[in-house]
Image: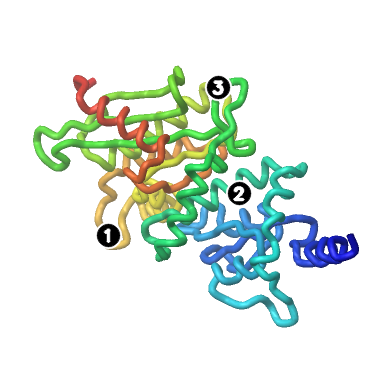
Amino acid sequence: MLRWLVALLSHSCFVSKGGGMFYAVRKGRQTGVYRTWAECQQQVNRFPSASFKKFATEKEAWAFVGAGPPAGQQSVPAEETHGASTVTRENASQREELEADVLCCNACKRPYEQSTNEEHTVKRAKHDEGRSTPIVGEDKFSYMGEFAVVYTDGCCSGNGRNRARAGIGVYWGPDHPLNISERLPGRQTNQRAEIHAACKAIEQAKSQNIKKLIIYTDSKFTINGITSWVENWKTNGWKTSSGGSVINKEDFQKLDSLSKGIEIQWMHIPGHAGFQGNEEADRLAREGASKQKL
């Protein structure tokens, strides 16, 4: 009995304080390890190509950042903290932790990040186990915290050719009445299809009085355009850095206008990587490309 009590007290000394998690920011406004999702979100929200992840131990978090903890701060041994994640998920901040888990998981799956095969396998397993599955509300929308979740995709067969056929897909969930599969109007290109799929999702969200929206898309072009490039384009009279005209000017103008009055989190997800939402949006886009042009 005495040995059991000593072991229990010893174990509790190694668990992160308050049963909390550690949020590692490898690429953001300020790299480092944070104790709350709110602090982490301030560093990565709308930061291009942000890289961040949630860990149960401080040691693992600093290892992900690629730096050591501040002088005088002791890291927590990884093998001693297996119970911390369970405690956190069961406490009052469950929704915040779930949201952070999903956003960190998906951000770290971006193909332009250098991840080991082992790291990628672990992240994929977390997704398949359902810990990053959005919560479906009574209104049939899926939510990450206060944010409704939607997947968008665009496709174009024969892209760049005279007989190109482009379509858009918007996926809100299984058999959701707002799921969209449409032919892209106007010029038929893959990039236009990706942009207009996002536009359609935002229009739908506003029609449902949704104020906060997470858009998952496999188009880094769309994400970079709306979060990084569009402000410079407007300042430069819709000219690129090389002085040329922005090819998708009207499309980004529409997306920029629609993005006002709604809080949007843009999340990149690898295309054709087995994620159901992305696969369904892709299927809807391909079906849309086969329809008659509007």
- Please give the residue where the numbered disc 1 appears in the rendered image: 243
Mark 1 and mark 3 lie on one chain; the one further toward the N terminus is 3
Question: Mark 2 and mark 3: span between their CA atoms?
Answer: 22 Å
What is the distance, in whole Å, between disc 1 and disc 3 at their CAs? 46 Å
> Residue 54 falls in which quadrant of the image?
bottom right
Label 1 environment density (alpha carbons within 10 Å; few <14, some 14–19, many ≥20): few
Q: Which residue is mark 2?
A: 100
- The reply to whether discs 1 and 3 touch (Cβ–Cβ < 8 Å) is no
Q: Going from the N terminus, do you reach mark 2 or mark 1 first?
A: 2
- Please tell me which residue lies in front, 64 or 42: 64
Q: How many marks?
A: 3
Residue displayed at 77% across by 42% down: 92
**Which corner quadrant of the image does residue 192 belong to?**
top left
Camera-side mark, 1 or 3 = 3
The outermost residue toward the right is: 2
Q: Secondary structure at mark 1?
A: loop
Q: Secondary structure at mark 3?
A: loop
Would residue 189 appear left or right of 196 to someone viewing this image?
left
Residue 78: x, y in percent?
A: 64, 67
Question: Picture quarter containing residue 167?
Answer: top left
On screen, 189 above or below 36? above
Q: Please rate how many residues cluster around mark 3, counting C-alpha atoms within 10 Å: few if below 14, some from 14 to 19, many from 20.
A: few
Quadrant for the N terminus, please: bottom right
